[in-house]
Image (tube, helix red, strand yellow):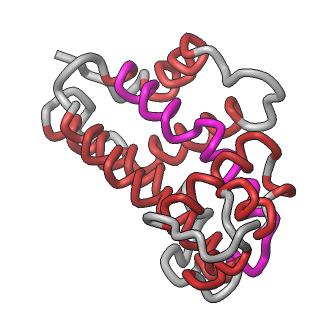
């Protein structure tokens, strides 16, 4: 790789390269060499911006978590519109897409990465924990609007949706599950709580 080539916004370019490697080749193929080769830069560029590869990976996952915060805000704003099942189906398809699942595989496979992520996500599995919080926040907003029963345990519903959704999406060799299958699961999980008006 050439040295001395300036990268504009190196951090974002390295993250984008890591995501492409992760999607194309899976978590086991994600190495510093693979990332810098994909980004078209010298290996030293990564180490100039991050203390080591696990620091890079932790920031990559935290960046994805920050994107979930944006999704969470949009999902909360959708409360009262459309249907609860439709909103949840779309949110789960986003939160549990191929990139998120690849990152979850990465987190599970790398002890040092999990240890670093414990600094910001002390319990649960990073990404899934934040996705469950996103769903719970949305369900609370719907409960406040009267579309979810006032006594509904929204935190348990959120965990159930994330856990079941993860099982639907994970381990697929081809395409993600069809949205109709996800919608059926969502409808089943929230059936006793939904009071749409």
User: Is residue 193 found left or right of 8 in the rendered image?
Assistant: left
User: Is residue 64 found left or right of 35 in the rendered image?
Assistant: left
What is the residue that sits farthest to the left in this orientation?
145
Residue at image location 80% in from the left, 67% down from the top: 33
Residue 40 image offset from top left, x and y in percent: 68, 58
Q: Is residue 135 above or below residue 129?
A: above
Q: Is residue 110 above or below residue 16?
A: below
Task: Pick the quarter of the image with the N terminus.
Answer: bottom right
Q: Is residue 83 above or below residue 126?
A: above
* Magenta region includes residue 60: no
What is the residue that sits farthest to the bottom in this orientation?
51
What is the residue that sits farthest to the top in this orientation?
180
Residue 92 image offset from top left, x and y in percent: 50, 34
Residue at image location 29% in from the left, 42% down from the top: 138
Residue 89 image offset from top left, x and y in percent: 46, 25
User: Is residue 108 found left or right of 9 in the rendered image?
Assistant: right
Residue 119 image offset from top left, x and y in percent: 53, 84
Res. 164 image quadrant = top right
Q: How many numbered marks, from 0 up?
A: 0
Question: Who is closer to the viewer here, 20 or 184?
Answer: 20
Res. 151 image quadrant = top left
Residue at image location 67% in from the left, 46% down from the top: 20
Report the magenta residues as a range: 86-114
* Magenta region includes residue 112: yes
Residue at image location 21% in from the left, 27% down from the top: 147
Question: Who is closer to the viewer here, 67 or 20?
Answer: 20
């Amino acid at each position: 790789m050439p040295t001395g080539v300036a990268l504009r916004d190196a951090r974002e370019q390295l993250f984008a390269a890591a995501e492409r490697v992760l999607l194309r080749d899976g978590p086991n193929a994600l190495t510093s060499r693979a990332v810098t080769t994909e980004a078209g830069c010298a290996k030293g560029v990564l180490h100039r911006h991050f203390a080591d590869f696990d620091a890079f990976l932790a920031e990559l996952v935290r960046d994805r978590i920050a994107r979930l915060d944006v999704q969470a805000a949009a999902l909360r704003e959708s409360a009262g519109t459309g249907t609860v099942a439709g909103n949840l189906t779309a949110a789960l398809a986003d939160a549990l897409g191929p990139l998120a699942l690849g990152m979850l595989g990465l987190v599970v496979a790398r002890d040092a990465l999990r240890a670093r992520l414990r600094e910001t996500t002390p319990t649960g599995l990073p990404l899934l924990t934040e996705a469950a919080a996103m769903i719970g926040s949305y369900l609370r907003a719907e409960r406040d609007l009267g579309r979810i029963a006032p006594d509904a345990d929204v935190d348990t519903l959120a965990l159930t949706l994330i856990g079941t959704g993860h099982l639907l999406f994970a381990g697929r060799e081809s395409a993600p599950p069809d949205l109709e299958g996800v919608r059926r699961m969502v409808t089943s999980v929230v059936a006793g709580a939904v009071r749409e008006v």
